Image (tube, rainbow, N blue to C red):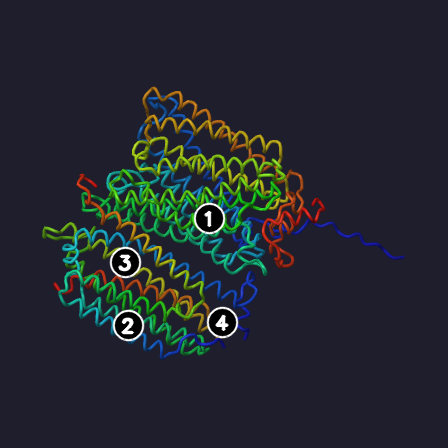
Amino acid sequence: MATITMPEVQAPRNYLTEKTGALSWFFTTDHKRIGLLYVASITFFFFFGGFFALLMRLNLLTPRGLLVTHETYNKLFSMHGIIMVWFFLIPSIPNTIGNFVLPLVIGAKDLAFPKLNLLSWYIFMLGGFVTLYAMVMGGVDTGWTFYTPFSTAYSTTYVIAAAVGILISGFSSILTGLNFIATVHRMRAPGLTWFRLPIFVWSMYATSVILVLATPVLAITLTMVAVERAFKVGIFDPALGGDPVLFQHMFWFYSHPAVYIMVLPAMAVVSEIIPAFSRRPLFGYKAVAFSSLAIASLGFLVWGHHMFVAGMSVYSSMTFSLLSYAVAVPSAIKVFNWTATMYKGSVDMQTPLLYAIGFVALFTIGGNTGLVLAAIGLDVHVTDTYFVIAHFHYIMVGGTVMAFLGGMHYWWPKISGRMYPEFLAKLCALTVFIGFNLTFFPQFILGYLGMPRRYASYPAEFQDLNVLSTAGASILGVGYVVPLIYFIWAWKYGDKASDNPWRATGLEWKTASPPPTHNFEVTPTVTWDAYDYQAQKEELHLG
Amino acid sequence: MSQVTVSVRTYAFTWATLLALTLLTSVMGLLDLGTFNMVAAVLIALIKASLIAAIFMHAFFGAKLVRIVVASGVMWFLILIGLTLADYLTRGLLPFPGK
Amino acid sequence: MADPLELAVREQFHDPAQQRETSTVAMWVFLITEVMLFGVLFTTFTVYRIGHPAAFDQGSAQMEFWMGAVNTAVLICSSFAMALAVNSAERGKRLRLAVYLLLTIGIGLVFLGIKFTEYYLHYQDHKVPGLNFQDSTPDARFIEMFFVFYFIMTGLHAIHMLVGIGLLSALLLRTYLGSFNGEYHTPVELTGLYWHFVDVVWVFLFAIFYIPGAHMR
């Protein structure tokens, strides 16, 4: 008699289950695992930097600012800025979602240089540890901008350690950018021509170009600050013949393109989410693709708008002002095209789309207030006030952080093979939106009325708006903490996700959720355009 | 066996040219030509650098992408130095203090 | 013996050509990050030079002009040796490759020897800012600034040379172990690119530090 052998039910083999144990994570070269290593790191830094913000907002509840001393307050805003800019925002989307999704979306097995990718993470962590050392040992009080000669000659805090930590992490950025550029140029699947690429790839590519060209400038500038401070030589110190404005030129040459490093990946994510949940191709594909490159290029020509009151020549200021108006144009093109994509689309208000729409709204406000700042006359009034703070938080928090959360929700099923709890997620998206506006809109008003930034105390008539802002910050904090909890919960207990729960186009959705280690069983050959929702509609006979 | 990109003869000729240019720039440096000293030095350096990049580094013979990368690097450095100098060289042109 | 080419093609690439092209593009992109790195130093130097040309000329007059000129020629020779090394690799001539790599390293060490001698001479003359800089001329502050840039820029360059020598030594070892042949020798090409770039930087350093004040010596 024949015996029937029952097939063993095996756990599916994917990048998570293939190899287990801590060493398989810390020595991985799989871009998907490295992306998750970065998720853990930047989440830690986000809440660490957020903690400093919490202390600042608590201090600002009263006009006299009695929570911390003024010296401590100076350290709080400096450390908040340093952590949030270099250890959260810059790596956030590129190193998490970018690392995970980029090879998938171009049909590659991995990035061009997987070992270099792992090295990037280790260098990032090294930079993080050195900076944390500076913070734990006593902090730094120069502002995240390290203006000289205060940073080089007068500050008594851990400037060199902080500068060294940051410049080390800069090398991590450079390697990532290099990896992405090489990958996009040479690792695309057969048939995947440039104009068939999803906009995600164009924007990540543009980001990588900035990473590679701007970050070395920061590294060497911070090195010069460290050398000046350590050896008491004069490069940027007027007492020794140096020029502090020259430091600002070099610093902002990097730091302005840096903000495009923060926003282009966010735009990359939004450009994927909006077509998917409108079930329509992205409107004006080529315009959006070229606008990414335009933002990356023009973004290098505008840095002087941070220095209108620093002592530059009038003609230089006027040039930078004009160019700053120009750089707004490609961003505006994207906003119009995203909106046009949704028009007459079959809009499905899932959580990722809520975050994406939130991005478009808040980025628009942030961007428009940037134009206010680009006008020299207006800038003289509001520079170094809370108006500027509100402007950049609208873009970085209302923009990038919302896009980051949107992207995490969108690709979560692909990353973990699970769904997150939908109703709770929508509630958190709403909480974030309300909390954010409550926190930062009053700051526009405060700045216009004259409240300076980086001040631990303020005139009594500004108290109401400050209290409102702090209240908003508490709500915003809740909106950030709850997703952390439910994502961790969903990792094990969420509903299992299908390969393509959103029925989205894009090569990443054509492989399993979670994907196998080598991404695709068979390397796809691409013969269709990106965002081929029309073809999908015809396939399903919905005409 | 992959094909040889550049012949030994071309390398040798480039090497000799570079040494000759070094001699030229050194000799010119010993003459007092005022501001032209610096200008000439940088110009000759540019020629030498271009030869090294084009011949020794195979940029002249390389893929189009390589040439775009090189051009971008040069252009971005020019943006850095150009826009920075645009500030310093236009100061003091108006009759107001500090402008 | 296993074919070096088969061993060397990594999993994420389809074929050796893709790997070679991708690595070459990546190395060039890395080199332009170095352009931006040194670019900041050249830019800030230029700003100060425009502001204080006389002082910077005086600083330049205190350079060891002939050591600088000889060093420029030395580096050009080492670049030539490196180019010949790449040429040998392309033709599969392993022994010649090893010889030229050794020559490149040797000439590079000569450069560093001359450089460190220069540094020592400056130290003896009390021209090292932050350590023992002394100058009693009216332009002392800006002559010191000149020397600050001199030490930072040539120092950074020397560090790059040391890294290059390390890379070349690793290449020498791999040549000995038979890692390269006429088909696969990409690391040799890429290290060559790096080495030539370091030479290019020196060409500009010589021009801005040594030449302007040479006629005043």
- Residue that carries the numbered disc 4 in the rendered image: C184
Select label 4 or label 1 by which is in front.
Answer: 1
The numbered dot on residue A291 is 1
Res. A256 mark: none
The residue beneath circle 2 is: B18
Instruction: Judge left or right: residue A185 versus residue A144.
Output: right
> Label 3, label 1: how many angstroms apart (C-alpha)?
41 Å
What residue is at 53 percent from the left and 66 percent from the top? Answer: C9
**Residue pictured at 58% horizontal, 49% vertical:** A21
Of tags 2 and 3, the one toward the viewer is: 2
Using the image, name the chain to which the residue with label 4 belongs. Answer: C
Chain hosting mark 2: B
Q: Amino acid at mark 2?
A: Leu
Q: Position of residue A234 (x, y in %)?
A: 21, 47
Do the residues bearing badges 4 and 1 touch, measured as CB atoms within 8 Å? no
Quadrant of residue A140 within the rendered picture? top left
